[in-house]
Amino acid sequence: MPAPGWRCWASAMRSSAVAVPLLMAAFPSSAQTGPALPTKAEVTIEISIKPGTDVAPLLPSPTLFLTAKPSSIRVPYASKSVALDAEDAATFPRTEIIGSTATVLVPPDEYELLDELLEGADVQISARLDKCPQPLGRDGDPNTRDAEDLVGRGVAVWDPSLPGGRSKAVVELEGRGLFGRLATQRSK
């Protein structure tokens, strides 16, 4: 059975001008002899917190949410959550890797197609350090937002001369800004 979010990802891929020729040729690929490991999906992310940003409102146990998507497509191909404790939250910058088989939203029989789509593509990374809702503890839900959450984006640029074929993504987390905080407060 496909991983959650795969149907949405596949639908977005089919409607993408970049992916249409590849999908029409290979989707679905149930005729493959066996799943290969994705080789172009992994991205190393260097995550920091903007100097002067207060992390105290996020404590005691924030969750770091990461998503990765090709620059030309709206839907992520990988997501990861990292539960942090107060000590972890104070240890930034930190390095994370996304796109391993454990974080890919694509079923194993589509890894080859994913590699084809990522060949030559920059990968956009979105990150959010999620506030621990009090007194309930960590909710672990990437869809919830709080005005105090820290957010950031980065891009891993395609460069075949580098190991793995792309640069690491550098993401600096900062407050959501006035609009983000107001939108969050109105939606509650």
Image (cartoon, grey):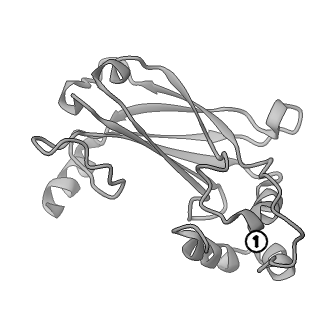
Horizontal and vertical percent position of residue 69: 61, 55
Residue 133 image point, x, y percent: 17, 44
In the foreground, 102 or 75: 102
x and y percent of residue 156 in the render? 67, 40
**Which residue corresponds to the image point at 52% horizontal and 69% vertical from the top-left?**
5
Q: In percent of the image, x 25 and y 39: which residue is there?
A: 131
| Pick the front one: 21 or 131 | 131
Q: Which quarter of the rendered picture does the N terminus lie within?
A: bottom right
Classify residue 139 as left or right of residue 45: left
Residue 174 figure quarter: top left
Q: Quadrant of residue 109?
A: bottom right
Neighbourhood count class around disc 1 (C-alpha, 10 Å): few under 14, some 14–19, many 20 upward: some
User: For the point 83% across and 73% down, which residue is it?
Assistant: 22
Say left or right for 68 vs 48: right
Looking at the image, which is closer to me, 116 or 181? 116
Determine the residue positioned at 34% across, 24% down: 89
- Count the labels in the image: 1
According to the picture, the residue beneath numbered tag 1 turns out to be: 19
Whether residue 97 sits left or right of residue 136 in the image: it is right
Amino acid at circle 1: Ala
x%, y% of residue 78?
Answer: 59, 54
Q: Describe the element under mark 1 as helix, strand or loop.
A: loop
